[in-house]
Image: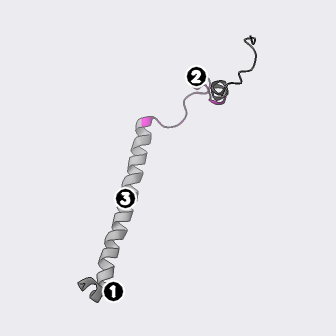
Amino acid sequence: MPSPRSKDTTVAGRLRSATPDARKYGRRGLPVKAQIMVLGLGRVASCGAVDTGAGAGARLVPDARPAAARG
């Protein structure tokens, strides 16, 4: 039986040693609610940019090629 002071070589033991202790190092990063809000705002901005580009392209194509727009 290994002594209590021996190094833990199991996967769980290695993960425990690699994960910082929150009580020792303090909390890092934004709270979960703030992270969700930031991700949501980023999604709104990126979707708005893509939709604006698609709308502008939909207006430009019929003006540039009227025969193709008529079918």
Residue 55 is covered by the magenta coloring: no
Name the residue at 58% across, 22% down: 23
Which residue is at the front of the view, 9 or 57?
Answer: 9
Name the residue at 54% across, 30% down: 27
Circles 2 and 1: CB distance less than 8 Å? no
User: In the rendered view, would you say 6 is above or below 32?
Assistant: above
The percent coordinates of residue 14 (x first, y second) are: 67, 28
Circles 3 and 2: CB distance less than 8 Å? no
Left or right position of 32 against 23: left
Q: Amino acid at mark 2?
A: Arg
Q: Amino acid at mark 1?
A: Ala
Q: Earlier in the sequence, mark 3 or mark 1?
A: 3
Q: Which residues are magenta?
A: 18-32
Number of the front mark, 3 or 2: 3
Few, some or many C-alpha atoms within 10 Å of disc 1 (few <14, some 14-19, many ≥20)?
few
Few, some or many C-alpha atoms within 10 Å of disc 3 (few <14, some 14-19, many ≥20)?
few
Predominant SS of the magenta segment = loop
Image quarter of residue 56: bottom left
Residue 20 is covered by the magenta coloring: yes
Q: Earlier in the sequence, mark 3 or mark 2?
A: 2
The percent coordinates of residue 34 (x first, y second) are: 42, 39
Residue hosting label 2: 23
Residue hosting label 1: 64
Q: Earlier in the sequence, mark 2 or mark 1?
A: 2
Label 3 vs label 1: CA separation?
Answer: 26 Å
What quarter of the picture does the C terminus occupy? bottom left
Q: Amino acid at mark 3?
A: Cys
Which residue is at the front of the view, 62 or 20?
Answer: 62
What quarter of the picture does the N terminus occupy? top right
Q: Secondary structure at mark 2?
A: helix
Few, some or many C-alpha atoms within 10 Å of disc 2 (few <14, some 14-19, many ≥20)?
few
Which disc, if any, is residue 47?
Answer: 3
